[in-house]
Image: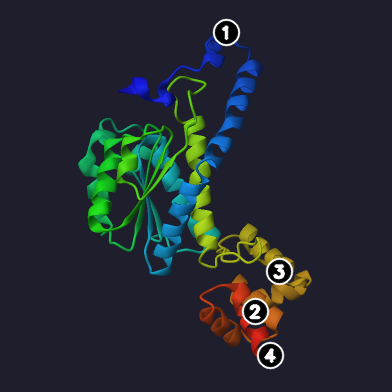
Amino acid sequence: MLDNLTTEKRNHSTMHLDEMSIMEILEVMNKEDQSVALAVKKELYHIEKGVQFVVAAFKQGGRLIYLGAGTSGRLGILDAAECVPTFGSSPDMVQGFIAGGVKALTEAVEGAEDDANLGEEDLKKVSLTAKDVVVGMAASGRTPYVIGALKYAQKIGAKTVSVACNKQAPMSQYADAAIEVETGPEVLTGSTRLKAGTAQKLVLNMISTASMIGIGKAYENLMVDVRPTNKKLMERSKRMIMEATDVDYETAESYFEQAHHHVKTAIVMILLQCSYETAKEKLQASKGFVRKAIKTNHSNHSS
């Protein structure tokens, strides 16, 4: 079965990999990596479809759940973990699962990816509902753990998205949005943590980022729902307030404190010259979209 997978084929540019100098290896890897973004570009239509599902899910209180084995699973968990500080989302809003559980993050759990029931069981553990979106990832496009999860998700009525790095991937038939990024033979034959892994990371970046923007987690190009949990993020928060409102550092800091360290509220307070309570109300009315909160105020004045 592996014979038909482009990710398992030998790369003709690297047949003498073991004889290459360090610089030659780096150059050929760099050259191969440049093809990944172009391969992703060909799948933007399907990625868009996936994002639309996730935005709709978020708006009705649903979750985004990633599943994968090996590299794919680790990338899903990484993306899920990074949504919390970046977008101020709750840890259960975006979740990641890997075949074999947490142990598989650092060591191989043999056979876990071949068990279709494990994928279903992981989704049952989080009480999957029809409101959720399940994104299954596998470079090969045929991992039983992922297929089992996608099948179960469809049975429950949840929207499903698949991310594979081969065309005609078996798991695509269980996806409402099937993303097939053909990355081709790896520099090191079959090592899908390379180009295939990079492609999946790019796709997940797009899915989570575009979905979070779709529910008001950005103003202009600023991540205004950031959780300032450390000194760096506290400073970044103040800088964002400065950028969004053209005030100086002291003013930004003052409003940041008045807004109880909530960047969006501070921005609305400054731009509308209103109280903390009014800013909170406006953000609530605009479902968290800063731009809408400000516009409604201006349109009220003009009418």
| Mark 3, residue position | 244
Q: First in sequence, mark 4 or 3: give its number.
A: 3
Q: Nearer the viewer, mark 4 or mark 3?
A: 4
Q: Quadrant of the C terminus?
A: bottom right
Q: Nearer the viewer, mark 2 or mark 1?
A: 2
Label 2 is placed on what type of residue?
Ile
| Label 3: which secondary element | helix
Q: Is residue 257 visible?
A: no
Residue occupying image coordinates x 66% and y 61%: 236
Point out which mark residue 19 bears.
1
Q: CA distance from mark 1 to mark 4?
A: 72 Å
| Label 2: which secondary element | helix
| Label 4: which secondary element | helix
Name the residue nearer the viewer: 129 or 223.
Answer: 129
| Mark 2, residue position | 294
Q: Quadrant of residue 30?
A: top right
Q: First in sequence, mark 2 or 3: give its number.
A: 3
Q: Quadrant of residue 294?
A: bottom right
Q: First in sequence, mark 1 or 4: give its number.
A: 1
Label 3 is placed on what type of residue?
Ala
| Mark 4, residue position | 301
Q: First in sequence, mark 2 or 1: give its number.
A: 1
In the image, is residue 101 above or below residue 168? below
Q: Nearer the viewer, mark 1 or mark 4?
A: 4
Q: First in sequence, mark 1 or 3: give its number.
A: 1
Q: Nearer the viewer, mark 2 or mark 3?
A: 2
Labelled pair 2, 3 in contact (Cβ < 8 Å): no
Label 4 is placed on what type of residue?
His
Q: How many residues crowd around disc 4 within 10 Å: few (fewer than 14), some, or many (20 or more)?
A: few
